[in-house]
Image (cartoon, grey):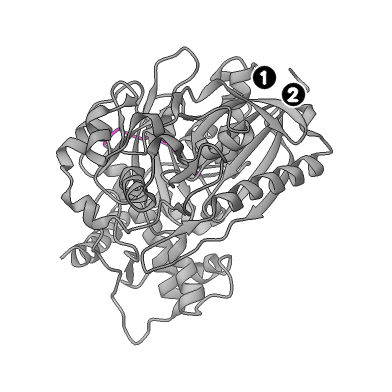
Amino acid sequence: MSDALVLAIDQGTTGTTCIVFDAELRRRGRGYAEVRQHFPRPGWVEHDPEEIWASVLAAAEAALGNAGARAGDLATIGITNQRETTVLWQRSTGRSVHPAIVWQDRRTAERCRELDRDLIRERTGLVPDPYFSATKLEWLLREVGGDPAELAFGTVDSWLVWQLTGGAVHATDVSNASRTMLLGLQDLEWDDELLELFGVTRGILPRVADSSGLIAEADFLGARVPITGIAGDQQAALFGQGCYEPGQAKATYGTGSFVLANAGNDAGPAPEGLLRTAAWRLDGEPAVYALEGSIFVTGAAIQWLRDGLGLLGDAAESERLARSLEGNDGVYFVPALAGLGSPHWAPEARGLITGLTRGTDRAHLVRAALEAAAYQTTDVLDAMATGVELLRADGGMSENAFLMQFQADVARIPVEVPAERESTALGAAALAGLGVGVWKTPAEIAALGRVERWYEPKLPEDEAERLLAGWREALARTLL
């Protein structure tokens, strides 16, 4: 299928990106449509599900137009999505019954404190946190009321599959299902005890499908196109980065950062502070799992310095400012602007800047924010204890050469940045193409990968340790 075209739908928190890839996994066309976030109360974050669907159609049409193609030219569609965001809709109409509750939403924090941490961790590989879908769905069912038999629940991938098939298919994949706090991680089936705990009836849930293989047939922009790939965004990035062997790891640097390492077929307990999650399940093969560290604030710290404090004209300026200093002069920034995620899981933690003197200026604060992204990532890698020998980086902040070099320096491992930075979309395309026979094996996909930059550790080890010791001291103050 050397002339095959694959459409990747990458539905994210602030917008939808659609990319048309060819059989060499080269980008042929791209489209983007923004999705608004709504903040009805402090700590609440919502989306309009119908706006999400409209953004997919707009971005897909733009991508196809940019590629000079039509929907009928597509061999398949792959979907990747913001995870944990919770949608509830009416089966008869296909219309949402409430705004989607976004993964960032904290309205169920009190409920999560009531949950049995050991039970949740043992069954799901997760920790009780508002981040995940179960308490969001519990809240929605209580607020909406009515007959659950008339409702359908899904993460964003399920919502899109329903819309793409005109309500004919209600499905998710193992990677997204494993983020709901309702799925048993060992058997990858909905867990009856957890369903009872959260008041969820089985009939409201989607079918759990493989991440690659025929999932549904879409009626899409006037054409019949198979959907043969689905994965949550971070698992899709792991696949798109070619991390097919245990121990291979990637870090996606965006608003927050997500570090995932391939854990093979091991569904056992994760090291303290980390999550274990389903990475993917290919058609007819055992599931692959991942260890995950979720860092809540990395790029968001740069955004805060720009928009909240007015210290930056744009994010790209951060690299120049960081390089204007010979060192950090003892200034550390712990960006706990939304609590701390892995490996600390301290939702009540608050941000802290230490080491300020009369000589501190905006460059120090910007450099400290960039360094914090690397320190937090290093903390997660250390907690994984899997002997990661190479970190594959993607996301918007991977364009910052200062950050990537500093990451290599403090983690003491090389950092590789691919030519195609949109690894989530790439992963969705790869899973879909694999599912329809564009590529026969993951090895064929890996051979198509192209590296743009490579960073080796350059900082002396004792200097890296000194910097990390300063970070840990600042972190300890935050966690008091």
Measuring from the top left, give residue 226's x and y in whole percent: 65, 24
What residue does disc 2 label? 4
> In this picture, which residue range is highlighted in magenta?
385-393
What residue appears at the point 36 percent right and 23 percent down from the top-left corner?
A: 264
Please check the rendered image and state whether residue 340 is part of the magenta-colored stretch, yes or no.
no
* Side (left or right) of 106 relative to 6: left
Where residue 27 appears, as percent x and y from the top left, is 71, 38
The residue at 58%/70% (across/down) is 314
* Disc with the residue nearer the chain's start (2 vs 1): 2
Q: Is residue 404 left or right of residue 94?
A: left
Residue to which mark 1 is pinned: 438
Residue 427 or residue 229, whichever sits in front? 229
The x and y percentages for residue 190 are 33, 27
Q: In the figure, 337 relative to 29: above or below?
A: below
Amino acid on which the number 2 mark rests in the picture: Ala
User: Which image quadrant for residue 200?
Assistant: top left
Q: Quadrant of residue 202?
A: top left
